[in-house]
Amino acid sequence: MLKAQLEKIRSITDFKPEIAIVLGSGLGEFAEKIKIHCTIHYSEIPDFPISTAPSHKGEFVFGEIEGKKVVLMQGRFHLYEGYTSKQIANPIRLMHLMGAKTLILTNASGGINTSFNPGDFMMITDHISCFVPSPLIGKNIDVLGTRFPDMSNAYDKELQKKIKKIALENNIKLQSGVYVQLKGPQFETPAEIKMLSAMGADAVGMSTATETIAAVHCSMKVCAISLITNYACGICDKTLSGEEVIAMADRVSDDFEKLITEIVKAI
């Protein structure tokens, strides 16, 4: 399947990206502001999933950021859409086969750490993925990676140092913490948030960890930025909504674009 998908993309473009970027909920407009070489809608690729989540456009965008060749996923896939972890891993593996050696993940998440505020960015330093199925379950694809990949440096520590420096130099508030992925689509209950907090989670969302596992399996370097769009359930007395996520992403879009651009430059 991956071979056929890569052949289809190569029949449209011979563009070979150095860096892959996954744009999370409410952050897709960044793709419109790069130097675009071409776009490929997911529907053009054989046996490829289609984005159904709100604000996820559903296409690969090939282009340049500060002279670096990139491929952006303008729309990702989630377990709550009915896709399997293997299907979610598919585009990560495909971007690796296109040539990308580094993966930048972004997402919108709920803040569990009470020192975080909506609008903060959190650099993911580690994740908790035990609540979702691994994309590596089943027969191993030996040409991609080892059967039992090490996850001790899943979020590359050298990239983390660069991101901290970038945030400081550009006066962008940056938190650091542990991200936990749940299946969704419902937001968490107060009891679940208490449990996650006790486990050491600082933010919660419905994506990212499965993509990281797939990328590490392919020996890609990974970094990830969460936008804290709201307090997690029970942290404050407020009803949660998907619209709140999009609205907060719009509010901080300038800082987000600056942060991602500078990270690309530093790679």
Image: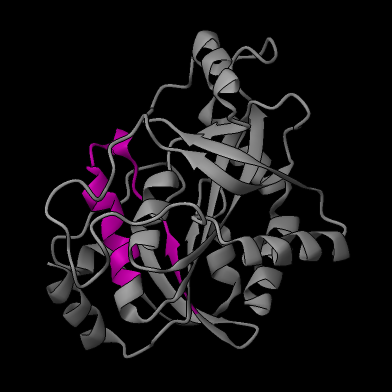
Percent across and percent down for residue 131 are 36, 29
Q: Quadrant of the N terminus?
A: bottom left
Percent across and percent down for residue 46 are 14, 66
- Residue 221 relative to residue 202: left or right: left
- Residue 40 relative to residue 198: left or right: left
Q: Is 94 drawn above or below residue 14 in the view shown?
A: above
- Residue 87 relative to residue 235: left or right: left
Percent across and percent down for residue 174 are 76, 49
Q: Quadrant of the C terminus?
A: bottom right
Q: Where is residue 246, by image quadrant?
A: top right
Q: Residue at x 30, y 38 (%)?
A: 79
Q: Which residues are magenta?
A: 70-95
Q: Residue at x 53, y 22 (%)?
A: 196
Q: Residue at x 37, y 32 (%)?
A: 130
Q: Where is residue 216, by image quadrant?
A: bottom left
Residue 48 located within the stretch drawn in magenta: no
Percent across and percent down for residue 15 are 38, 88
